[in-house]
Amino acid sequence: MSVIEKCTSYTRSRDLKKRGWYPFYLNFSERDRGVARLPDGRRVIMCGSNDYLGLSAEPRVSDAAAEASHRYGGGCTGSRLLNGNLALHDHLEKELAQFFGKPAALLLATGYQTNLAAVAGLCGPGDYVLIDKQAHASLIDAARLSRARVQWFAHNDTEELTRKLERLPENVGRMVLVDGVYSMEGDLCPLPELIQVCRQHEATLLVDDAHGAGVLAKGRGTCAHYGLMDEVPLVTLTFSKAFGSAGGAILGDEDVIEYLRHHARSLLFSASLSPANTAATLESLSILQDEPWRCEAVISKATFMRRELASLGYPMGTSQTPIVPIDTVNEQRTLLAWNLLMQQGVYVNAVLPPAASPRLRTSYIAVHTEEHLAQALEGFVAVRGQLLAEPARAHST
Ligand code: PMP
């Protein structure tokens, strides 16, 4: 079969569209503070974003983006190494290092590229990368790109990690990759145990804190939540979630950051973060410090929703964050429930394999009002019959 032929025989998305069940690539015509509008004018409560603090539509953030675009232009038209570096980029790196309490920071154009830079920039053939089975796709791709040997350990299973590390040959580079907050479960990595295991086996720990940064520990993220920021050699961030912008950064020691600045291919061979996104992230960082209520509000709203959903009979997993998944058992139920929720004016994320087991990923925003959450709960009451009915897992597709 040619590489093109598989596209002709790929009909799954078209079939779903024909049945009116397609839950992806939704066109939003507006998004603002916990709600979104569809092109037909319908308003939905946004329970499926990563805009945890509600900063993406905050006027201070959009004004900063607009001003930077006027001043520096729509893009930097080149890599930071040669012609795309702005004083604004260096300024954001300094602010990030200071806020998160790390010696240095390196800015990249997306969170995805950030993980590629950190892992493939440091590991190579002959090294070993050990990765949690539920770690984000960008860490998996980064490990593969590095050409190091890749091994997996069960989610949050530090005993299996220990056994795998014990069996590695001596004198090889070892890196352990985990998420701080897991994007599909909302649970945290067991950081104290991971640090101990990595120390015992001379492995370098990298925590991808895409979903913890900006949210936990007054915004300083998962490592600060555990009081262990100094013990984690590498932390990666993205600004496409709580920071309401785009881009990412690696936090680490000065030598490591300087090395990556000259070796990380996803930095060297790609245009720099846009002026608008750089300025937006700087402004979000400043709001985060001026308005600590946002971090408290998002956690208390998610806690309220978890409690209400549990009282409706929904099984709640191990989430301690604004991410609250609802197990939907199989694809059919996922799509049906997603559609019913849309009819009720509630947008959530329909998640299907291979991304993760079937589920509705719901998430909450600091600026959701009581009315927003009440409407969302009405939706969950309406779909409860569909989601909680037997048959259960044995019938999953
Ligand atoms: N890491 C994690 C855990 C993520 O969830 C994501 C985005 N979904 C990324 C990295 C990539 O970030 P970005 O969207 O900024 O490329």
Image (cartoon, rainbow, N blue to C red):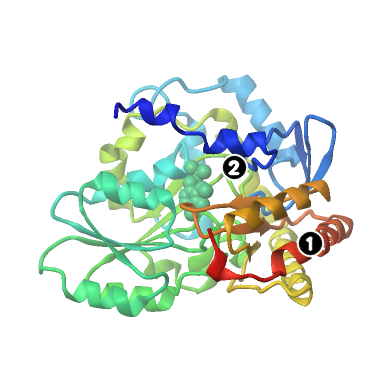
Please provide percent x and percent y for residue 350: 62, 51
Q: Is the residue under label 1 in contact with that under label 2 (CB below 8 Å)?
A: no
Classify mark 2: residues with Cα within 10 Å, few (<14), some (14-19) or many (20+).
many
Please provide percent x and percent y for residue 265: 29, 36
Classify mark 1: helix, strand or loop.
helix
Ligand 1 within 8 A of label 1's CB?
Answer: no
Ligand 1 within 8 A of label 2's CB?
Answer: no
**Can residue 81 be seen here?**
yes
At label 2, the amino acid type is: Leu
Which of the 4 quarters of the picture holds residue 106? top left
In the displayed structure image, the side of residue 181 where residue 1 appears, left or right: left
Q: Earlier in the sequence, mark 2 or mark 1?
A: 2
Which of the 4 quarters of the picture holds residue 289? bottom right
102 over 187 or under it: above or below: above
| Quadrant housing the N terminus | top left
Instruction: Identify the residue at the far right of this view.
Output: 371
* Residue drawn at the location 10% of the way across and 69% of the way down: 170
Instruction: State the residue position of label 2.
Output: 282
Classify mark 2: helix, strand or loop.
helix
* Residue drawn at the location 47% of the way across and 39% of the way down: 110
- Asked whether 29 or 380 is in front, the reply is 380
- Asked whether 369 or 396 is in front, the reply is 396
* Residue drawn at the location 42% of the way across and 72% of the way down: 156
- Asked whether 135 or 357 is in front, the reply is 357
168 over 258 or under it: above or below: below
In the displayed structure image, the side of residue 14 where residue 57 appears, left or right: right
Classify mark 1: residues with Cα within 10 Å, few (<14), some (14-19) or many (20+).
many
- Asked whether 218 or 194 is in front, the reply is 194
Instruction: State the residue position of label 1.
Output: 380
In the displayed structure image, the side of residue 351 where residue 249 appears, left or right: left
Please provide percent x and percent y for residue 255: 28, 51
**Can residue 93 be seen here?**
no
